[in-house]
Image (spheres, helix red, strand yellow):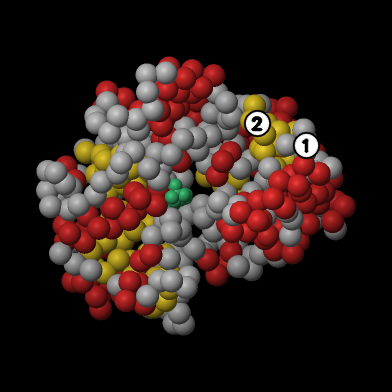
Amino acid sequence: MRIRSKLFYERALKSIPGGVNSPVRACKAVKSDPIFFERGEGPYLIDVDGNRYIDYVCSWGPLILGHSHPEVIANVYFAIKKGTSFGAPTWQEVELAELIKSCIPSIEKIRLVNSGTEATMSAIRLARAYTKRKKIVKFEGCYHGHVDSLLVKAGSGLITFGIPSSPGIPEELTIHTLNLPFNDFSAIEKIFKEYGKEIAAIIVEPVPGNMGVVLPKDGFLEFLREITIKYEALLIFDEVITGFRIGLSGAQGKYGIIPDLTCLGKIIGGGLPVGAYGGKEEIMNFIAPEGPVYQAGTLSGNPVAVSAGLATLKELIKPGTYEKLESLSKRLEEGIKEVLKKLKLSYQLNRVASMFTLFFTEKEVIDFQSVLSSDTQKFAIFWQKMLDKGIYIPPSQFEAWFISLAHEEEEIDKTIVAIYDVLKEMH
Ligand SMILES: *Cc1c(COP(=O)(O)O)cnc(C)c1O
């Protein structure tokens, strides 16, 4: 029973649009009311009615250590006792910048902001200023925050100029955004042939997580690197999810690509609002006050937020963390695959490191179009039944599930059994 959640939701609807402060929380895609949570403990979430769930949302990615990690809480407490914000530099910012640089060598200089959206917005501005060009290439199904110029949908045909995907965005703001299918080499080749000299940058989630997890084809990221070098455009890796998720050096470390700029967020804030963008020194020196490109923030580098990020990264650099995440994730993947085999279902599971998606489709999922072949009705039923078994997965088919260091084999095995029971009931 979720009586108190329901009551809070009714109240919320009267004061907050849709009752939520970020749309996907409303659980509309799974035909449910939102759940209001009271607290988090390791791999568990506890709602306001006292129900406990094994959590695979992990606040949409940041909580790679799980909820209420003692080191994070202690560090935040230590910082907050000294004040919440100074609007002036603090030592924590320097430490976080140095720590990130030491893990991601392509980042020679880094600027902290307050969200992933701010990071991508600023990186795009910087890329345009540096190249003195206007056009940006992005990929269908990749999400880069709610930046006006990046909220575009594809029109018809392979090569498409961005059409705003939300009212309130004039076409003039998306006309320079070129929206292409992910993993499509020839579409990219074609667009660079036509507009190469006008393209400031490609921005890409190297492993997209925001249409559900989709893996780059062999050579795809290398291809993006080569073509941007050839046409003197910048390559921006949006690693807001993959940064410190796929490994200490993110997707760029795993795939061996050196982007010009990298956007970070989520994990580097340890559950508090932090984003960042960084890259080659020569490019980053264009940012004010060193250079002419304006970008600022009242609370940027906030000592409390940064202390949560620092504590998180310091845990992650300890030996064995990514090995543990990999072994748990592999256990869950293999368990789910065995369940599917037993039930003679051929749903697709895409995984990299501790992020994955189970797609309710039999088609191989390699881009936005194949993602859309998923049966979202079935997913909605699956989500509800999993919830009733005490397992909280993202309330949309088109999202990544995350495993944290707080998960143990016990939670993983319970999840596999629940998936078996639920899918068996459904089919
Ligand atoms: C979450 C996300 C963003 C936006 O970050 P916010 O902190 O929500 O603004 C940008 N890019 C990617 C890849 C993301 O997953």
Q: Quadrant of residue 185?
A: bottom left
| Distance from the alpha carbon under mark 1 to that under mark 2 | 11 Å
Q: Which mark is residue 39?
A: 2
Q: Relative to 6, say whether 67 is above or below.
A: above
Secondary element at image label 1: loop
Residue 196 percent across, percent down from the top left: 22, 71
Q: Is residue 43 visible?
A: no
The residue depicted at 38 percent of the width and 65 percent of the height is 148
| Residue at x 37% of width, y 75% of height | 170
Q: Nearer the viewer, residue 124 or 248?
A: 124
Quadrant position of the N terminus in the picture: top right
Q: Which residue is mark 1?
A: 49
Looking at the image, residue 42 sits to the left or right of residue 236; the answer is right
Residue 201: x and y, percent? 27, 61
Q: Please state which of residues 357 and 148 is positioned toward the viewer in this rendering.
A: 148
User: Taking the image as drawn, is residue 21 in sight?
Assistant: yes
User: Tag 1: Cα neighbours inside 10 Å, few (<14), some, or many (≥20)?
Assistant: some
**Along the horizontal axis of the image, is 363 left or right of 381?**
left
Q: What is the three-letter code of the residue carrying label 2?
A: Arg
Provide residue 411's location: percent of width, then percent of height.
Answer: 71, 31
